[in-house]
Image: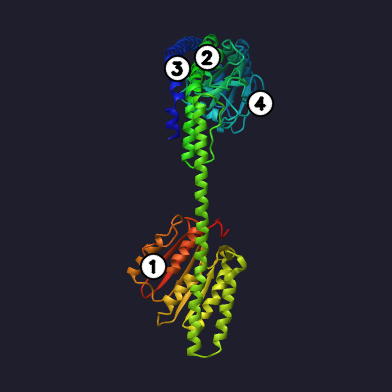
Amino acid sequence: MRSFSRLNSMQTKLTLTFLLILLPLVSVSIFANYYSQSIMNEQISDRTKGALLTTLEYIDQLTQNMDQQTLLIASNPNIVDIWKGIENPLSPDHLYGIHTVQQQLTALTNVNGAIKDAFIIHGESGNGVSTLKGGIKWPDVKKDYWFQQTIKGSGGLVVYVPTRESRNPSLYMSEDMIYYMRLLDVLSSTQEPNVMVLAVDKRSFQKIIQNLQTSINMNITLLYNDGFVLETNPNSENLHKEEPFSITVKKGEWSMRLEQPRKEVFKLSHNLQQFTYLITAISIMLAIWIAWLVYSSISKPLQQLSSAFKQFSSGNLAFEVVHQRKDEFGFVMNGFNRMAAAQRKMIEDDYEKELRLAKAEFSLLQSQINPHFLYNTLDSIYSVASSKRIPEISEMVINLARFFRVSLGKGRDSFTLAETVQHLMYYMRVQQIRKDHFTVEIELDEATKELQILKLLLQPIVENSIIHGLEQSPNEGYLCIRSRIVEDRLYVEVEDTGVGIPEDRLQEIIMEIDKITSKSYMSSPDKPTSLYYGLKNVKSRVKLYYGGDADLLIDSQEGKGTKVTLILPMGKEGHT
């Protein structure tokens, strides 16, 4: 509702009117910005893709060159024959032949500056020769991932790029190299697991790619089979502060990804965009400012008065309109303040009268219970005295005296639940002496014993259980008082095994006590006040004292007994 009222306010309508006037201009400006940016984006993307593809073609030619070099070596009979059918190439019998192979590999590396190392590995023994390291021993070379891939290649060129995350990192291979590998004797139908490898320094590729680097914040990444090979600017701090401008191209197994901050790419159109946005922002601010001027002079006083009426109608009687106006609106606001003050005084006077009446009625309700119980108890003592003439009368009188002493309570309005039950025991002991065919059980949850409850709440309920329930039953019975806490509420139950209440009368009782609420807590005027007096008294007092969350429930079955449950909210005045 508040959002709806804001949308219908005068200020909102004025502001929206001025903004609608500016809407075509703002829309055209924003569209022109985005359209020019899309055209520039398309042009830059096309040019960048062309440059990346040209570089990839050069890298692909380098790979084809390595393919030809490895094929020439792998099919050279002068090299193949030396490695064929031997068990260990590093044995003294083969040193001359191996030295010849090393010289030929060295000549190859001297001709092609990109090749930094060339070596041949004998698969069965794991021994081999390298142009940089001479004779090498490579134990368990068959388990290396690159070697297994070369064997699977069946004489085809295999490119291997080792990284820190590579499977089975190799003994003599570096992360700074890209390795081109092929089986020896590719023309033979029975190929032995001998592998020749050419190592090309990644810096050769870096130099090729570096020509595309036009900004210190640009980063170009080279990938092979979607696996990382190298990048030109891995430590750029400004690249990933926002979503970068990114283009990826692919040629064969190789691919390249260029990333650059968008602010750099669209630097030319950035100033135009900023200027357009500035004009748009100034226009919107002017529209809001003009709407505010109109609102302040005409609509704001009306809004103040409307808010004042809403506050007053919602119950905020102390609300006043604060203003310094000397015009007609000021006269109306002063009239509202005078009207509110008069209404507030009238309501306060009526409320004070009602409060005094409620306190008087509460005292009357609380005082009525003592004479009512006194008459019943004295009648019980008289009956015992007339019929038995025995010393039990003394105990009854003592318990009765203790009961009334606690009832007076020295001005206290509430007692702990444990004190309340102890108080009830004096009364129940008198009734047990009078008629001893029922027992009493007390089941109080430890957490409830120290909770404060209004005094004399349970006495009328216990009295009803004994007089109207247990005394009317010819059988032995029991009276049980139990307590528990459920969801921040104190439950106190008084249950007996008396004669119970017939269904029609039970419904009548429930209907009568349900008429008593926290706002209307007096007894129903259409019934005598003596009818169900005890239950009405308890229900009226808990509703008046604890509020609407408090309640009294009755459950009974004829011939089986009755259970009355008091529900008192925790944290309310009276028990905390």
- Mark 1 and mark 3 in contact? Answer it, CB < 8 Å: no
Q: Position of residue 259 (x, y in %)?
A: 54, 18
- Mark 1 and mark 4 in contact? Answer it, CB < 8 Å: no
Compare marks 3 and 2 and give the one earlier in the sequence.
3
Splitting the image into 4 quarters, where does residue 448 fall?
bottom right
Residue pointed to by mark 3: 18
Residue 132 left/right relative to 218: right
Q: Nearer the viewer, residue 538 or 433?
A: 538
What amino acid does circle 2 point to?
Answer: Ile
Compare marks 2 and 4 and give the one earlier in the sequence.
4
Compare marks 3 and 4 and give the one earlier in the sequence.
3
Q: Nearer the viewer, residue 93 or 332?
A: 332
What amino acid does circle 3 point to?
Answer: Phe
Q: Residue at x 53, y 70 (%)?
A: 443
C-alpha gap between disc 3 and disc 4: 98 Å
Q: Residue at x 56, y 18 (%)?
A: 79
Report the disc number at residue 528.
Answer: 1
Q: Position of residue 383 (x, y in %)?
A: 47, 85
* Nearer mark to the viewer, of 3 and 2: 3
Q: Secondary structure at mark 4?
A: helix
* Nearer mark to the viewer, of 2 and 4: 2
The single residue placed furthest to the bottom in the displayed view is 389
* Nearer mark to the viewer, of 2 and 1: 1
What amino acid does circle 4 point to?
Answer: Pro
Splitting the image into 4 quarters, where does residue 405 fall?
bottom right
Q: Secondary structure at mark 1?
A: loop
Report the disc number at residue 282.
Answer: 2
Residue pointed to by mark 4: 92
Residue 561 left/right relative to 484: left
- Mark 3 and mark 2 in contact? Answer it, CB < 8 Å: no
User: Callout 1: 10 Å neighbours few (<14), some, many (20+)?
Assistant: few
* Nearer mark to the viewer, of 1 and 3: 1
